[in-house]
Image: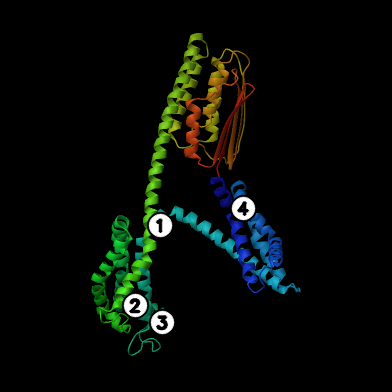
């Protein structure tokens, strides 16, 4: 399912375009006799051929956007959507054919695809900007409602002040709100403008009062704790107790009389109670959805905290494992009293510095991980009596994303521990690494003397768990053993 979700995400634009085209032709099918599948499918194919460049570009859009330079990507985008589609529309407009109805529908589809692409571009840019504006993300629905109430009140107040003195709207018995905005009138009657704004805001605040009670009291404390029956009864009791008071306050507003008694002077009319009940009913789905979002965010935060704690514990299990190996290397060299011992100690200190300091960082560059692997292999070759066949080929693109530290070395260390170090005869370790902006591929093939043995241990188990936490649904880790050869492959998806 995660793979299917990722695939749908990369093809979302194409799916939207095909859906738009299908809706255009489905709306046309309503005027025909039912069962005309041949007509429907042939027209879909015709439209698909006409819009093929745009559909083809949208199919590979996400892939090209992540792998191509920015200038190249936008040149091809302009060619498809700013050159081809307008040229197609122009050509179809002046093309006289016997199938004028089909031609017009193809034109409609082309215009729809062009407009939809512009909407998607604006949406992507807007989402990027919103992610940068942290203060917008902190605005809750309640705050958004209050801001909307204020903006609507100011707008209505401007319209009301602008309508004063206009015989078309300022009638003897009431003031109508004309769609008229005269800022000069606002400055001339600024006191009236402030008064009207406050009164309009109070009107909306009365409605917000029922929403607030529903959101903070009725749903979380009555509906969740005691069920639907008591929620409905409590809601009706709350409305019965409150609506006469709210109705009286609204009727006393000076602007109520000025607007022709929008709110009845009798506060006990049942229609006021029906309006309050309606607010509770209409806000109920919104409140339930808000409560679910809050609960879901809390669960996600707890899961994230738990995952991070587990990652820290796994990292603590890995570090002693590396320390033991490096100390064993140093002990073996000291026994031989080799001339290289001082340099080796220095190199070991570099390795330990990487493990202690770099391992605390969330990610490191692929080049840093490669240098660590090369230093580790060099130390292994110094301490082993037999010289194994070690090959390490790698190709890393300049835009390759960083990776978590000590991720690749686990496979190398496992190959050395279970394949090269215990070997009494010729042994080998062959590694290949390819990393670019989209993915990372690493394979580690080593010799194993005992057929049927299963090389592994805490290192591979921790690696698998780290991958599950860091790359859920975006990795593949496999191991296989055959003919005295053990192979481990790791693939990471960055998109």
**How busy is the neighbourhood of tag 4: few (under 14 within 10 Å), some, or many (20 plus)?**
some
Quarter the C terminus occupies: top right
Q: Is residue 146 above or below residue 439?
A: below
Disc 4 secondary structure class: helix
Q: How far apart are marks 1 and 2 (CA)?
A: 31 Å
* Marks 4 & 1, CB-CB < 8 Å contact: no
The residue lying toward the viewer, choosing from 331 and 471, is 471
Q: Name the residue under label 1.
A: 136
Q: Name the residue under label 3.
A: 178
Disc 1 secondary structure class: helix
Q: Indicate which label's residue lies in the foreground, 4 or 1.
A: 4
Q: Position of residue 142 (x, y in %)?
A: 35, 61
Q: Mark 2 points at which residue?
A: 187
Q: Position of residue 250 (x, y in %)?
A: 27, 76
Q: Is residue 274 visible?
A: yes
- Image quadrant in which you'd find residue 44: bottom right
Sequence-first disc among 2 and 4: 4
- Image quadrant in which you'd find residue 101: bottom right
Q: Name the residue under label 4.
A: 61
**How busy is the neighbourhood of tag 3: few (under 14 within 10 Å), some, or many (20 plus)?**
some
Q: Indicate which label's residue lies in the foreground, 2 or 3.
A: 3
Q: How far apart are marks 3 and 1 (CA)?
A: 33 Å
The residue lying toward the viewer, choosing from 54 and 278, is 278
> Residue at position x 65%, y 74% from top?
31
> Residue at position x 32%, y 89% from top?
173
Q: Distance between the residues labelled 2 and 4?
A: 52 Å
Residue 111 appears left or right of 471: right
């Amino acid at each position: 399912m995660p793979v299917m979700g990722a695939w749908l995400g990369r093809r979302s634009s194409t799916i939207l375009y095909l859906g738009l085209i299908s809706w255009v032709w489905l709306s046309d099918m309503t005027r025909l006799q039912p069962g005309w599948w041949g007509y429907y499918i042939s027209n879909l194919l015709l439209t698909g051929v006409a819009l093929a460049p745009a559909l083809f570009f949208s199919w590979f859009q996400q892939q090209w956007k992540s792998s191509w330079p920015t200038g190249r990507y936008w040149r091809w985008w302009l060619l498809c959507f700013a050159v081809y589609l307008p040229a197609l529309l122009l050509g179809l407009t002046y093309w006289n054919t016997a199938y004028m109805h089909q031609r017009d529908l193809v034109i409609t589809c082309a215009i729809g695809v062009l407009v939809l692409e512009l909407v998607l571009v604006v949406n992507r840019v807007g989402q990027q900007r919103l992610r940068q504006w942290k203060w917008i993300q902190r605005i809750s629905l309640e705050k958004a409602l209050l801001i909307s109430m204020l903006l609507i009140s100011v707008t209505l107040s401007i319209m009301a002040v602008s309508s004063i003195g206009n015989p078309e709207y300022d009638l003897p018995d009431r003031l109508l709100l004309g769609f008229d905005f005269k800022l000069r009138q606002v400055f001339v009657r600024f006191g009236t403008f402030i008064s009207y704004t406050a009164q309009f805001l109070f009107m909306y605040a009365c409605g917000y009062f029922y929403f607030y009670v529903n959101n903070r009291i009725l749903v979380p404390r009555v509906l969740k704790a005691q069920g639907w029956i008591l929620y409905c009864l409590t809601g009706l009791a709350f409305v019965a107790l409150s609506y006469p008071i709210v109705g009286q306050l609204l009727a006393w507003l000076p602007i109520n009389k000025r607007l022709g008694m929008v709110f009845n002077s009798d506060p006990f009319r049942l229609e006021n109670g029906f309006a309050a009940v309606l607010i509770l009913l209409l806000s109920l789905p919104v409140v339930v959805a808000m409560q679910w979002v809050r609960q879901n965010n809390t669960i996600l935060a707890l899961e994230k905290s738990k995952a991070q704690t587990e990652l820290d514990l796994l990292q603590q299990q890995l570090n002693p494992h590396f320390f033991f190996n490096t100390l064993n290397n140093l002990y073996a060299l000291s026994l031989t009293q080799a001339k290289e011992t001082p340099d080796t100690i220095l190199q070991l200190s570099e390795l330990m510095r990487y493990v202690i300091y770099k391992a605390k960082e969330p990610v490191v560059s692929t080049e840093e991980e490669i240098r660590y692997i090369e230093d580790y292999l060099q130390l292994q070759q110094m301490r082993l009596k037999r010289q194994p066949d070690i090959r390490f080929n790698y190709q890393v693109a300049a835009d390759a994303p960083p990776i978590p530290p000590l991720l690749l070395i686990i496979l190398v260390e496992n190959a050395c521990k279970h394949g090269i170090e215990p070997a009494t005869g010729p042994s080998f370790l062959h590694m290949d690494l390819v990393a670019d902006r989209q993915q990372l591929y690493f394979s580690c093939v080593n010799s194993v003397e005992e057929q049927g043995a299963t090389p592994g241990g805490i290192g591979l188990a921790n690696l698998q768990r780290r991958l599950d936490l860091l790359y859920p649904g975006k990795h593949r880790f496999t191991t296989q053993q055959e003919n005295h050869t053990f192979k481990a492959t790791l693939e990471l998806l960055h998109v």
